[in-house]
Image (cartoon, rainbow, N blue to C red):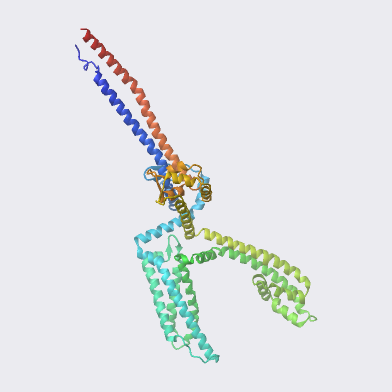
Amino acid sequence: MPSKYSSGKVSEVQWTEFQSWMQTQLNQKFREQEAKIKEAFDGLNNRSWQLGDARARAISEMSARHSMGADTELGISSTSLPTVRLDDSIEVVAQPVSPHSEHSDMKHTPHVTRILGKEVVREKLKANQPFKAFVKKGLDFYMALVVLANLACIIAMTEWTVHQTDLALGLTDAEWAGASLETFELLEYVFFGIYLLDVLLRMVTLRREWYFDQMEGIMYLNIFDGVLVLINLFELVALPAMLLGGDQQQHATTIRVIKLVRIVRTLRIFKTVSLFRQLRILVGTCFASIGALFWSMILLIVLQIGFALAICQALQLFILDTQADFEARMEMHSYYGSFAKALYTMFEITFSGSWPVRVRPVIEKVDAWYSVPFLAYVTFVVFAVIKIVTALFLKETLTSAANDADMVMEDARRTAQAYHYKLQELFHLADDDGDGNLSREEFVETMSLPSVQHYLRTLDMSIQDCRPLFDILDDGDGLITIAEFVKGLSQIKGQARAVDIVILQRENAKLLAECHHIRKDIDRIQRTLPRMLRSVASGLSAASGESETVFTA
């Protein structure tokens, strides 16, 4: 009799073992798929905390691409966004962008790139070359103190000169109570040595960056420092040698006046000292408004020249009239007797606010009809044009303040700090037992209060159901710490952004891919399982037939 194992038949014990093995494999497979689905769903919640990092990386890569032209050098299409990875699990695939939107984004990119570039260079400089970073930024503060001390010395020396003048004129007999001339001259050489050492130290340390920086361009202040040191060198060393035996005092006084320009160096500390941030913005606004100031002055000068010519020619008849009062004629001549006098008078009328003093004598002593052109000029120029120019400067000030890199980052930091403080205050109000954690009951009870809902709406958050929010904020231990509370609510503030939506779309795509793999595995099992069952059934029937034959025999 042939063996049942050799003929492909299976025994009942083998069939039982096969069923156990099949059930074990299916259970293991379903547990794996269930774990993957749960992990994917948990990832949607847990990774929401990291959307801010992904957004920052995306903006950084976009800024770097626009600033360094990486898309051209590496052959990457300029109409796609860079790939963003978040903890090696989130991948944002390149999405096509229309050329129009690409062009509009590039218009706003240079300022972001400039801010980011300066910060990156500054951080790398601090990390790699601390002494160079100190020379480039930190030394300005100490040199500003030296400049202020030198300014005080110049003021004291000026007072000494005035005292000597008073003695020469016989206006005073008192002796000078301050430092002597020799002390002032010694201090001049001390300050000159400090300035010379400062310039040489910067030139040796910074090298090419002393006169040209990749981020800030030409370093005008450094060049200005070098010019001042050369002038100081000429005054203290070359000038005495050139004027031996001559009148050195007069020449030295002329050069000393030029040295007053050195106080401009104090403007350099506005870049590093937060105390002078508002003044630094004002100075930057003045430089940014040079173009608007130039064309505004051109307009005002044209208007003043035209009106000055008309008034000067019109009043010449009155000035030459021998029948008129002589004092009135001389007064008109002093104000409007020539083009230069008339132009200066119109400058006073326009900018000093003294137009009644300059206009009323003409109306009262010459002719009342002169009030018509003067009132028209005052209304159009003094009132309208000056107000428009003031509004233009105000607009430039606001634009300069809005584009200031340090101010933008400082405002963002203050806003985030104030927002976190409000959330911490809300957390302490919700923590009834004071253990530093929020349970589900405490969280739901507090967040459901109408006053808390209204407070959250003022923070640009709208929470309809608190229970799902607790599951989102919780890390799995059933309690919410203050860090989880603040971080979680900060992430859900406001509307969803483009990067957030793209990341969630990518997560959904990965989840759908996992579900597709599960479906394929189930379909494969469904296709193979009937054949296996038929094979097992045929084996069982054959084994049963053999058993009956043996039993009958």
What residue lies at 53% left-to-right and 65% top-to-bottom?
A: 282
Residue 13 in picture, x, y percent from top left: 24, 20
What residue lies at 74% left-to-right and 82% top-to-bottom?
A: 327
Residue 431 in picture, x, y percent from top left: 43, 50
The quadrant of the rendering that contains the N terminus is: top left
The residue nearer to you, when weighing 407 against 208, is 407
The residue nearer to you, when weighing 211 against 30, is 30
Q: From this viewpoint, is residue 543 visible?
A: yes
Q: Left or right: 398 with respect to 194?
A: right
| Above or below, 62 relative to 23 | below
What residue lies at 29% left-to-right and 18% top-to-bottom?
A: 536
Q: Quadrant of residue 347?
A: bottom right
Q: From this viewpoint, is residue 317 visible?
A: no
Q: Left or right: 15 with respect to 382?
A: left
Residue 170 in picture, x, y percent from top left: 55, 92
The quadrant of the rendering that contains the C terminus is: top left
Residue 315 in picture, x, y percent from top left: 74, 75
Q: Residue placed farthest to the right in the image?
A: 323
Q: Residue placed farthest to the left in the image?
A: 1
Q: Left or right: 439 with respect to 363?
A: left
How many numbered markers are drawn?
A: 0
| Above or below, 291 relative to 251 | above
